[in-house]
Amino acid sequence: MDCYSNVLTKDNPFVPPKGTRCPVNDIPPELLALIFEVGAQSIEDEEDEEDEDEAMAVNDDVDEDGLSEPSMDSDATFEPVPPFEVLISHVCHHWRMVALNTPSLWTEINVSPLDSPPFERVQILLGRSKSLPIDIRIDCEPPDDEEEEDSSGSEDSELGQYPRSMTFSDLDNLMSLLVPHISRWGSIEVAVACYKHMFVFLSAVSDPSIAGAPQLEALQLYHHEDAESLTAFAQPDLVQHFKLFGGVAPRLKSVALWGVHVDWCQEWLSCGPNLLDVELAYHTDDVRPSWKQFAAILCGAPKLETLSLCSSGPLGAPHDWYPEGSSGGYGDDYTGVIELHSLTHLVLAFHLPVYVSGLLRRLAFPALKSLTLDLDDGDFTDLVVQLAGPMMTAVPVAPKDGEKKRSLLSGLDTLKISGFPCSDRSVELMYAELGNLKTLNLAMTYLSPAFLQLLYHPCSVPGQRDVCHVCLPSLTTLSTADVPGHQICELVQKRKEAGVPLKAVYMEEDDEVTDHDLQWLKDNVEEFDFFEASDDEYESLADIEEEHEGSESEWEEVDD
């Protein structure tokens, strides 16, 4: 019997080995380190889908190395699950030594608004990551429950700070730790609710002693604070346009500047050969780039794929910009139009009709596939005619005999609309040009019902009297907000009957959907799911102050 039992238990992974030997320790350290790296990456990939740990409160625990975890709630009763790299470093001495000597496990540096000097975790991570590029996120915004509290009478309130948030001197101390490693920065994200915090950061990375940020690929600066004026920066004493990193960041791929202005002429911005994504948002008129500076940014980024302009862009009105039809040294055929050959995704939000129209007359997007519009002030009916008309080009191109010039809309496969006041007839004109559209996202709260109704009611064909068809014949994916379930069911059914069925439908999770409608939708489309309204890319200016994601950057436990 013992022999039979030994056969069954031999090499059985569910039966612990006898004696003191642990077979897993036979794995070479180099291979074990690789396993750790794969595990850490898999956890990182799942973070966006699993946020349960962020909702758990944190105690004032001290780990075995004397590093304390800041508490968000004095009544907390639950502990968060430690991050993967901390877990594996506490299994046994051998694993700990391998983990601590695997620099790639320690390259994420997240600083919450409750962290304070001497920033032990930052110092530990800077050491453990050795010479590898580091990804940094600094959150100076107060916790959600503190934002609305009255801070009158406190020392910080006089400085424009919220209670229980990182002080200006604390941030200055933090930057004194990080700046010496600026040559290793792979990405930097800073979120603030008070611009003085951003000013401290900008000052630190603009020191004349900084030679550059040679490995930096992503720069994301967010100032989330209501602007009292759209024309003048609220704090004139902080209006300085800084030159960051000595103007040198040759590998920069992504730039996001929300309510943060810089020297628009510095080299990494005006000559960004590797720039793929530029996002400018919420800049008052007096700190925006001039048309010449804005044009230099675009012309200096030949690989640019995404351009997002949300209440930002070149200063002034279109008639103040570079004159159309000027040769400007580009040759006799130059039209004043900047052609962005690689741009595939364009976002325009919170602009007046004349401003958007002027932009689209001076910019050409021959490869554009995705367009996002959140325009809520004015009548954009004339803009629809412009979008449906012949696409702008840098050099005039005569159409071939009998060939219709391609419109900007005709090349799109993805369209998202959150706001676009226009006539119902112009919606028909727009949809008639979207014959190749595959994905449509409609936030119907502020849109005309025609945007949805035309998806399942026959519409006329321009220029062909008495000819009707179902709009957007190539549409396969629809996302909606503020639309009840029974209306979506009707839309799905009618498009199926018309021979242009939808394959995937996504609805905002707060919309009214009965159990019957839910089951019907799951039975009649290949994929159905709900999404959160917070997934929307932009919010109104009044809502910016309410958007805080401090919990995402809370320190996880790190030991030494």
Image: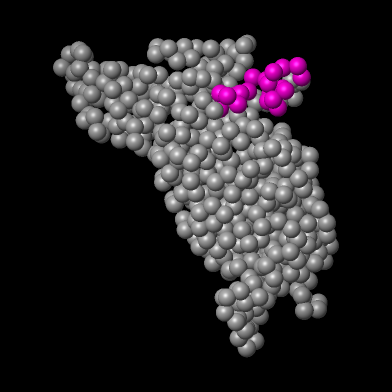
Viewer-side residue, 172 vs 538? 172
Please check the rendered image and state whether residue 238 is part of the magenta-colored stretch, yes or no.
no
**How many numbered marks are there?**
0
Q: Can residue 321 be seen?
A: yes
Q: What's the magenta bit mostly, secondary-structure-wise?
A: loop
Q: Is residue 523 above or below residue 411?
A: above
- Magenta highlight range: 152-171
Q: Position of residue 175 (x, y in %)?
A: 50, 30
Q: Is residue 538 left or right of residue 303?
A: right
Q: Position of residue 556 (x, y in %)?
A: 49, 23
Viewer-side residue, 279 vs 237? 237
User: Which part of the image, by quadrant, shows the C terminus?
Assistant: top left
Q: Is residue 522 left or right of residue 491?
A: left
Q: Is residue 176 above or below residue 150?
A: below
User: Residue at 60% of width from left, 26% of height from top?
Assistant: 168
User: Residue at 21% of width from left, 30% of height from top?
Assistant: 28
User: Residue at 53% of width from left, 35% of height from top?
Assistant: 204
Viewer-side residue, 24 vs 115? 115
Q: Position of residue 202 (x, y in %)?
A: 57, 38
Q: Is residue 488 above or below residue 195?
A: below
Q: Can residue 471 be seen?
A: no
Please check the rendered image and state whether residue 160 is part of the magenta-colored stretch, yes or no.
yes
